[in-house]
Image (cartoon, rainbow, N blue to C red):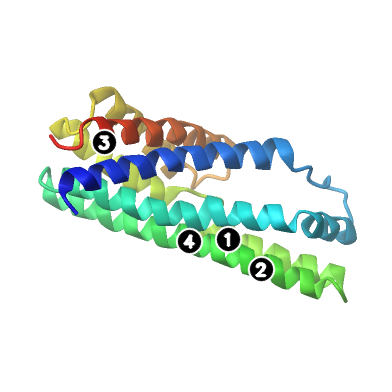
């Protein structure tokens, strides 16, 4: 694969990443009607059962497919910046690869957990929801509830690009803000997670367009 072709494919994948984010926000926030906080185990289980296909496909798209596309983006960006501050570029690549693994693992665990709790729910709804709670904790810990690893990746490549002007200066400044917001998700505040998610939509699409329009420097 030529460097120019890799940049264009990476740019296209980056744009798809942004679109996946948008789709997830719409479905999770505007389409699915979650049970309220006072819902019983049976009501929560019924929601998961009724929306099984939607949730499974959404988990697959938002995590597993996202992770696969992300791996191409990570490689393409690494190839683009590897000659600029080589050590920092390599460190960014390492964090990018780790993020890919965490995202894919999060999706696989969530989907397998969803299958399991529906089977358990046939005999014990309460035990099923206890199991789902454990699955959710693991999933959130891997990356669903924090974006530290992804934030470090975006921050590092943005710092490299800012120093060497590999990407437009406004884009690198946005990347620094995105990365900082991702790192700040270590604090249990939804605000930082929302800022990271929304700003990264813009970042993914913008950096994707840049890589397609200017595949080589």
Instruction: Give the label on residue 139, or none.
Output: 1
Between circles 1 and 3, the one closer to the viewer is: 3
Upstream in sequence: badge 2 or badge 3: 2
| Local SS, label 1 | helix
| The N terminus lies in quadrant | bottom left
Q: Which residue is mark 3?
A: 211
| Local crowd size for mark 4, using a 10 Å CA cut-off: few (<14), some (14–19), many (≥20) | many
Q: Which residue is mark 4?
A: 104
Q: Would residue 209 be found to the left or right of residue 201 on screen?
A: left
Between the C-alphas of marks 2 and 4, the distance is 14 Å
Is residue 176 visible from the viewing direction of this image? no
Q: Would residue 32 be found to the left or right of residue 156 on screen?
A: right
Residue 36, image quadrant = top right
Upstream in sequence: badge 1 or badge 3: 1
| The C terminus lies in quadrant | top left
Tell me where residue 118 appears, x and y as whole percent.
Answer: 78, 68
Q: Would residue 10 be found to the left or right of residue 163 on screen?
A: right
Q: Which residue is mark 2?
A: 113
149, 8: nearer the viewer? 8
Give the residue at x 65% y 65%: 135
Between the C-alphas of marks 2 and 3, the distance is 37 Å
Between the C-alphas of marks 1 and 3, the distance is 32 Å
**5 to 60, vertically: above or below:** above
Between the C-alphas of marks 1 and 4, the distance is 10 Å
For the residues bearing labels 1 and 4, Cβ distance under 8 angstroms: no
Between the C-alphas of marks 3 and 4, the distance is 24 Å
| Local SS, label 3 | helix
């Amino acid at each position: 694969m030529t460097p120019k072709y890799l940049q264009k494919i990476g740019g296209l994948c980056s744009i798809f990443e942004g679109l996946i984010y948008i789709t997830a926000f719409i479905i999770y926030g505007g389409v699915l009607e979650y049970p309220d906080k006072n819902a019983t185990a049976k009501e929560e289980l019924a929601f998961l059962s009724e929306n099984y296909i939607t949730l499974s496909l959404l988990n697959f798209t938002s995590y597993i497919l996202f992770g696969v596309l992300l791996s191409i983006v990570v490689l393409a960006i690494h190839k683009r910046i590897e000659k600029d501050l080589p050590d920092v570029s390599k460190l960014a690549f390492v964090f990018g690869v780790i993020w890919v693994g965490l995202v894919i693992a999060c999706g696989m665990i969530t989907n397998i957990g969803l299958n399991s709790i529906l089977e358990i729910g046939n005999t014990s709804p309460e035990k099923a929801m206890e199991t789902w709670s454990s699955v959710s904790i693991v999933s959130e810990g891997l990356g669903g509830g924090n974006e530290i690893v992804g934030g470090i990746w975006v921050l590092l490549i943005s710092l490299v690009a800012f120093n060497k002007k590999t990407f437009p200066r406004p884009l690198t400044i946005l990347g620094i803000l995105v990365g900082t917001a991702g790192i700040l998700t270590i604090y249990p505040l939804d605000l930082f997670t929302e800022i990271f998610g929304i700003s990264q939509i813009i970042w993914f699409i913008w950096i994707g367009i840049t890589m397609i329009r200017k595949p080589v420097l």
